[in-house]
Image (cartoon, rainbow, N blue to C red):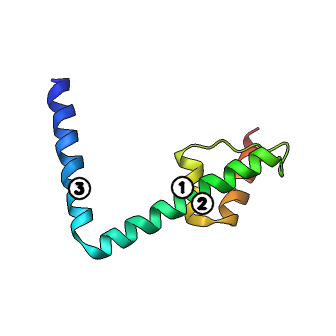
Amino acid sequence: MKLIWIVMFAISSLALIVVLLRNQLSRLSLKKVIVHWIIAATVLFLMNYFEFIQPYALPINPLTIGTTAVLGLPGIALLMGTQYLIG
């Protein structure tokens, strides 16, 4: 049963990639998303590496990268505030 779900997931993922790469507008949007994620991951890495925010070391995972990519600097402030309130 697991094998059926894995095969179905693989086929649907390939179909999604084909659909995204066929359309010019989708390719441009996909490139923009990838570039934003790379920049966000780099900023988070540099902030942790150079210890700009020493007590608030933000983890680098898809949630923090996505928040930073979508919201930018306010997203980093949001993550730091959330970490301050929780921890």
Residue 47 in the image: x percent, y percent? 76, 51
Quadrant placement of the N terminus: top left
Give me the C-alpha separation between circle 2 and circle 1. Answer: 11 Å
Residue 43 in the image: x percent, y percent? 68, 56
Q: Which mark is residue 33?
A: none
**Which residue is farthest bottom?**
25
Residue 49 in the image: x percent, y percent? 77, 45
Q: Which sits in the foreground, 44 or 67? A: 44
The answer to which quarter of the image holds residue 18 is bottom left
Counting residues from the N terminus, which is met first, the one under dot 3 or under dot 1? 3
Residue 50 in the image: x percent, y percent? 81, 48
Q: What kind of residue is marked 1?
A: Gly
Counting residues from the N terminus, which is met first, the one under dot 2 or under dot 1? 2
Q: Which sits in the foreground, 22 or 13? A: 22
Give the structural element (helix, strand or loop) at label 3: helix
**Which residue is farthest top?**
1
Quadrant placement of the C terminus: top right
Residue where numbered disc 1 is placed: 66
| Nearer to us: label 2 or label 3 | 2
Residue 20's place in the image compared with 11, above or below, is: below
| Nearer to us: label 3 or label 1 | 3
Give me the C-alpha separation between circle 2 and circle 3. Answer: 25 Å
Q: Which sits in the foreground, 61 or 39? A: 39
Q: What kind of residue is marked 2?
A: Ile
42 relative to 23 in the view: left or right: right
Residue 83's place in the image compared with 29, above or below, is: above
The residue located at (26%, 64%) in the rendering is 21
Residue where numbered disc 2 is placed: 39
Residue 57's place in the image compared with 69, above or below, is: above
Give me the C-alpha separation between circle 3 and circle 1. Answer: 20 Å
The residue located at (20%, 24%) in the rendering is 2
Residue where numbered disc 3 is placed: 16
